[in-house]
Image (cartoon, grey):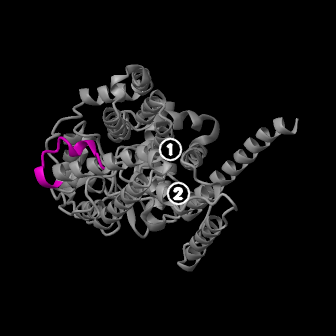
């Protein structure tokens, strides 16, 4: 009987370790990001669409909602459904914890499949949570854990980890089905991952055995079908209009297309180190060579796709390839390389290792102490941007409680007017359209609120600042034109704006002015 009970105790012990690692790394990642972020950045476009889903009469005719309605629509629906019992902030908080926990659970499972001891898997999780040595970075702006406010990439990355685990186990049907789930939450990331999976299947000759992959591919298409319907709707609205140009992406989201030199070097070094280690394993007939081969194939594919993106975006300038954002998964290169590097030296059989656990504790504690030293102490609090103690937060709260109905005209570079005030605005730079669907109208509106003073800066932050500066100089006749073209009756302007009129509210940074006929 003791023999029968041991496997159960072992499984329970493994589950307990896994739960502890996932909880610790999730809490550390949130704390070092200074809490759970609600309503900032991409949530500016997400929250109004959530409200429209729950109430079809919410802000009828709102331009920002119309151009973002099909953007990550499945994720938005999930968030909206969670908001019914938990409220908006509760839904986003739950998704934040769930997304990060899914990533660390995927790391734990994949590390176990590759033979990494629990302490080494914990060390990797802590290193990624604190962003050690560019482990959470690719060649562009996106991070492995996501960029602050929870959005679909975090869940897509977690699903890819489980997909790589299936790939290591040679369960191709499961790997393809999980790729469909990845595409369901983030179609672009899912498409890039399907390219990687397909390339490896071709290289390994798996395509000659349809029973090993065809049911999985069919399942992937079925699972991703709701997202594909959104793509069809966007195609009808002009998604591919102007696809051969890249001037618009250089204006509105260069951070997703441009390479960052320091990150390119880090990703390349990780990839090279992995390849050299794998070559040594193969030369010595080490079993790890075959075990890690799928990971090296993924790394090689991702680095090649990043190179193709580079050539199209910087050299050929066609736009046809760059629009796919083939560099979106480059942050997996350091993560997968780290899994290989942590498997060396091999785990000694005669004793339990202590150094990985010691390093994990040292790195985690060091990151927490460093936060306090920098004056930015780690925190697990909710960071609700709608309640931010800023002039912008103050004016949007006043409008939400006391402001007249919209639409308004507002500084286009400021984030989240509609999400914070429940009023429509003519245009917001952060809420930009997918591809060419609505792009021409979005550009016309930006041109109108800046008196034809669109900026030429090279970074998104600088563009936003220049847009606000141009808006601050908009003459009275510009506001009269906005009133005629867009039915605007109220403007939010910088305190120093030359606009005269009946002042409804002011603080140190902004004035709310009625545009009376």
Q: What secondary structure is found at the residue carrying circle 1?
A: helix
Q: Quadrant of residue 437?
A: top left
Q: Nearer the viewer, residue 249 or 139?
A: 139
Tell me where the magenta segment starts and ends, as one range: 314-327
| Vertical arrangement, residue 362 with respect to residue 52, above or below | below
Q: What secondary structure is found at the residue carrying circle 2?
A: loop
Instruction: Identify which residue is drawn at 36% across, 50% down.
Output: 299
Which residue carries the number 1 mark? 158
The residue lying furthest to the bottom in this view is: 373
Q: Which mark is residue 343?
A: 2
Q: Is residue 319 magenta?
A: yes
**How far across and down, in percent of the image, does residue 136 sit?**
45, 59
Q: Can residue 120 be seen by looking at this rendering? A: yes
Q: Which of 272 and 462 is in front in this view?
A: 272
Tell me: 25 left or right of 393.
right
Graded by Cα atoms within 10 Å as few (under 14), some (14 to 19) or many (20 or more), the crowding at tag 2 reads some
Instruction: Identify which residue is drawn at 49% across, 29% down.
Output: 174
Q: Quadrant of residue 360?
A: bottom right
Tell me: 171 left or right of 378.
left
């Amino acid at each position: 009987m003791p023999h029968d009970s041991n496997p159960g105790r072992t499984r329970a012990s493994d589950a307990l370790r896994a739960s502890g690692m996932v909880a610790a790394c999730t809490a550390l990642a949130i704390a070092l990001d200074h809490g759970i972020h609600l309503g900032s950045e991409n949530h500016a476009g997400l929250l109004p669409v959530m409200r429209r889903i729950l109430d079809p009469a919410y802000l009828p005719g709102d331009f920002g909602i119309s151009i973002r309605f099909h953007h990550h629509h499945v994720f938005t629906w999930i968030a909206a459904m969670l908001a019914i019992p938990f409220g908006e902030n509760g839904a986003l908080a739950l998704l934040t914890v769930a997304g990060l926990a899914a990533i660390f659970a995927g790391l734990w499972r994949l590390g176990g499949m590759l033979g990494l001891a629990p302490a080494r898997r914990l060390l990797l999780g802590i290193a990624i949570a604190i962003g050690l040595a560019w482990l959470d970075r690719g060649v562009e702006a996106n991070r492995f854990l996501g960029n602050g406010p929870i959005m679909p990439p975090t869940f897509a990355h977690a699903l890819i980890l489980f997909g790589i685990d299936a790939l290591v186990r040679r369960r191709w049907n499961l790997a393809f089905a999980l790729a469909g789930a990845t595409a369901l939450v983030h179609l672009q990331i899912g498409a890039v991952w399907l390219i990687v999976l397909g390339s490896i299947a071709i290289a390994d000759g798996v395509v000659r055995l349809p029973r090993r992959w065809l049911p999985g591919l069919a399942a992937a298409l079925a699972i991703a079908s709701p997202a594909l319907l959104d793509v069809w709707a966007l195609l009808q609205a002009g998604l591919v209009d102007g696809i051969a140009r890249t001037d618009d992406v250089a204006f509105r989201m260069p951070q997703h297309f441009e390479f960052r030199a320091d990150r390119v070097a880090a990703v390349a070094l990780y990839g090279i180190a992995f390849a050299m280690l794998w070559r040594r394993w193969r030369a010595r007939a080490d079993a790890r060579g075959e075990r890690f081969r799928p990971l090296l194939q993924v790394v090689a594919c991702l680095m090649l796709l990043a190179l193709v993106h580079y050539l199209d975006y910087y050299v050929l300038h066609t736009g046809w390839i760059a629009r796919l954002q083939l560099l979106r998964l480059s942050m997996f290169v350091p993560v997968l390389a780290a899994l290989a590097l942590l498997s060396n030296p091999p785990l000694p059989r005669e004793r339990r290792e202590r150094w990985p656990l010691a390093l994990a504790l040292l790195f985690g504690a060091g990151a927490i102490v460093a936060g306090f030293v920098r004056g930015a102490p780690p925190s697990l609090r909710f960071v609700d941007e709608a309640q931010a103690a800023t002039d912008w937060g103050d004016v949007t709260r006043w409008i939400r409680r006391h402001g007249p109905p919209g639409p308004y005209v507002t500084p286009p570079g400021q984030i989240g007017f509609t999400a914070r005030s429940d009023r429509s605005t003519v245009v917001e730079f952060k809420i930009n359209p997918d591809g060419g669907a609505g792009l021409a109208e979005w550009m016309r509106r930006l041109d109108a609120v800046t008196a034809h003073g669109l900026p030429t800066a090279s970074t998104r932050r600088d563009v936003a600042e220049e847009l606000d500066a141009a808006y601050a100089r908009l003459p009275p006749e510009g506001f009269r034109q906005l009133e005629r073209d867009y039915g605007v009756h109220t403007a939010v302007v910088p305190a120093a704006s030359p606009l005269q009129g009946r002042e409804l509210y002011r603080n140190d940074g902004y004035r709310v002015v009625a545009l009376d006929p």
